[in-house]
Image (cartoon, rainbow, N blue to C red):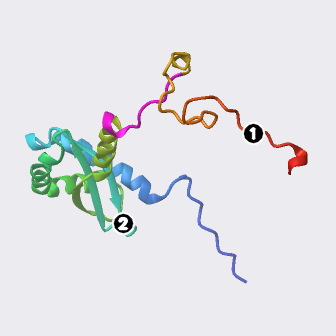
Amino acid sequence: MSKPRRSAPSSTHRYPRTARLNETLREVIAEELTRIDDERLDLVTITAIDVDPEMNRAIVYFDSLLGEDGDAGILQALADHRVRIQGSVGRQVRAKKTPILSFRPDDVIRSAEHIQQILAASDTLPPRPPSPDDVDEPGALDGVDDPDLDDRGLDHPAPRIHRHDV
């Protein structure tokens, strides 16, 4: 009779392998960018990495203080230094494979900035309701709909419904 097969030891990590690899790649690539002496990459930040489950390819998302105007130059600089960056990843990351890197601007951050600008613009916000302190002033509620006021501004309370009316 053969011995029962041992079960594989459970992983001590609390999040998936690809998430750990994404974070490790982000740190390694960001560190390598600081070592590269190219002024086009001075204001670049690596914001996220997306590695496919087979670890064949990785999309590196970046942002820059130059915004969309600097994307073409940054993409060219990253393409020029891709082999060096990928070699650094291969030396520093313990993995069977080194994913092929591709670079893209991070549209999520730019969309969030655009939404923030829209919300900050004064013409997109509705007018502010009067504060409770302003209500005592005459004319403070002009233009405010009050169901108890008629067209002439006279106060007519809403009719009460009594139990025997129902």
Q: What's the amino acid at mark 1?
A: Pro
Q: Which residues are magenta?
A: 122-131
In the image, what residue occupies the spot 17% across and 38% down? Answer: 43
Hey, which quadrant is residue 114 in on the image?
A: top left
15 vs 69, nearest the viewer: 69
Q: What's the amino acid at mark 2?
A: Asp
Q: In the displayed orientation, state which residue is furthest to the front.
A: 152
Please provide percent x and percent y for residue 31.
Answer: 25, 42
Residue 155 shown left or right of residue 91 in the figure: right
Residue 7 shown left or right of residue 65 in the figure: right
Q: Which residue is mark 1?
A: 159
Q: Please name the predominant secondary structure of the magenta segment in the image.
A: loop
Q: Is residue 38 visible?
A: no
Q: Which residue is mark 2?
A: 52
140 above or below 70? above
In the rendered image, the quadrant that contains the N terminus is: bottom right
Q: In the displayed orientation, state which residue is furthest to the right.
A: 164
4 vs 107, nearest the viewer: 107
Label 1: how many Cα within 10 Å (few below 14, some 14–19, many 20+): few
Secondary element at tag 2:
loop
142 vs 128, nearest the viewer: 142
Q: Is residue 12 visible?
A: yes
